[in-house]
Amino acid sequence: MKQKLGRWLVPVFGGLAFLFLLVPIAYVFAFSFNDAGRTNLTWRGFTLENWKNPCGAPDVCQALGNSLQIGFTATILATTLGTAIAIGLVRYRFRFNATANMLIFLPLATPEVVLGASLLAQFLNLGAELGMGTVIIAHTMFCISFVVVTVKARVASLDPKLEEAAGDLYASPAQAFWRVTFPLLLPGIVAAALLAFAMSFDDFIITNFNSGNVDTFPKFIYVAATRGIPAQANVIGSAMFIVALLVVIGGQVLSHRRAKMLAAR
């Protein structure tokens, strides 16, 4: 009886938890169709005008563009540097290897408010002008740790003998890396890049400390929340969620097809 009850309770509670997590997303999606006036706090009627003109709210698309520019730039820099660091930490042993591993995890354990304030003090001491550049540097810095942790796990799972076999077949170190190591690391690198972009696009605390007069989408939402987030912001948030969902589904479909092809061989 207890086992039978447990079989029902686990999926039921799991489903309830899943629904609880989706409630805010459902609210955002629903109110993207709200015929809002000056505020978007109460339902006033269904309309498609918000989706037809997502830039209708002042400065919302400019803030989105800034977030996308910062996110893509920080992701490229963090993924490049983080992948190199991950390979170095796993494949090579040097004197301060353990210390380097510990330092990589420090940004993950440091509260964002402390990290943001410390970076602000650093930029002010250096006389740097707060703006797009300082935000990109800050985002690159804390995204590197996420990239290293993700790619490091992938590097550790690879067999070094594959590179040795490529060398035995007269491949140069560069050819062995690009034709053997890199394709095997690519799933981990892509996962790390997606995580870094999500962290950068979503960040508010560190951005608020170091952005100066540059508005990002999270900053726009924070300021707009005092008077009711415009429906156009809900449209953009819903669109970003749909894009992320399609990326995840596409990745799962490709992985399933690749597994079927390998099994067929």
Image (cartoon, helix red, strand yellow):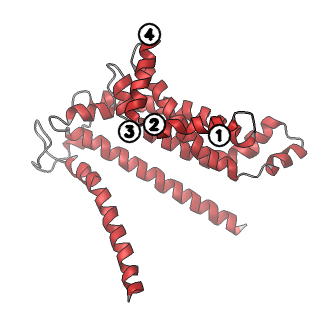
Q: Residue at x 53, y 41 (%)?
A: 146
Residue 164 is situated, as x and y percent measured from the top left of the image, at: 84, 46
Identify residue type, mark 3: Asp
Q: Nearer the viewer, residue 234 or 83?
A: 83
Query: In the rendering, which numbered label is found on residue 30?
Result: none
Query: To which residue does mark 3 refer?
Result: 202
Residue 128 is situated, as x and y percent measured from the top left of the image, at: 44, 13
From the viewer's perspective, tell me whether residue 63 is left or right of residue 127: left
Q: Give the Cα distance between marks 2 and 1.
A: 20 Å
Q: Nearer the viewer, residue 77 or 152?
A: 152
Identify residue type, mark 1: Ala
Which label lies toward us, 3 or 4?
4
Whichever of labels 1 and 3 marks the residue nearer the N terminus, that label is 1
Q: Disc 3 on helix, strand or loop?
A: helix
Tell me, yes or no, whether the two marked residues, 1 and 3, touch with CB atoms within 8 Å.
no
Which label lies toward us, 1 or 3?
1
Whichever of labels 3 and 2 marks the residue nearer the N terminus, that label is 2
Label 1 crowding class (10 Å Cα cut-off): few <14, some 14-19, many 20+? many
Query: To which residue does mark 4 refer?
Result: 127
Residue 228 seen in the current view? yes
Residue lying furthest top in this view? 127
Q: Give the Cα distance between marks 1 and 3.
A: 24 Å
Q: Residue at x 38, y 89 (%)?
A: 1
Which label lies toward us, 3 or 2?
2
Q: Give the Cα distance between marks 3 and 4.
A: 27 Å
Query: To which residue does mark 1 refer?
Result: 86
Query: To which residue does mark 2 refer?
Result: 110
Q: Give the Cα distance between marks 4 and 2.
A: 24 Å
Residue 265 is situated, as x and y percent measured from the top left of the image, at: 73, 66
Q: Give the Cα distance between marks 3 and 2.
A: 17 Å
Residue 169 seen in the current view? no
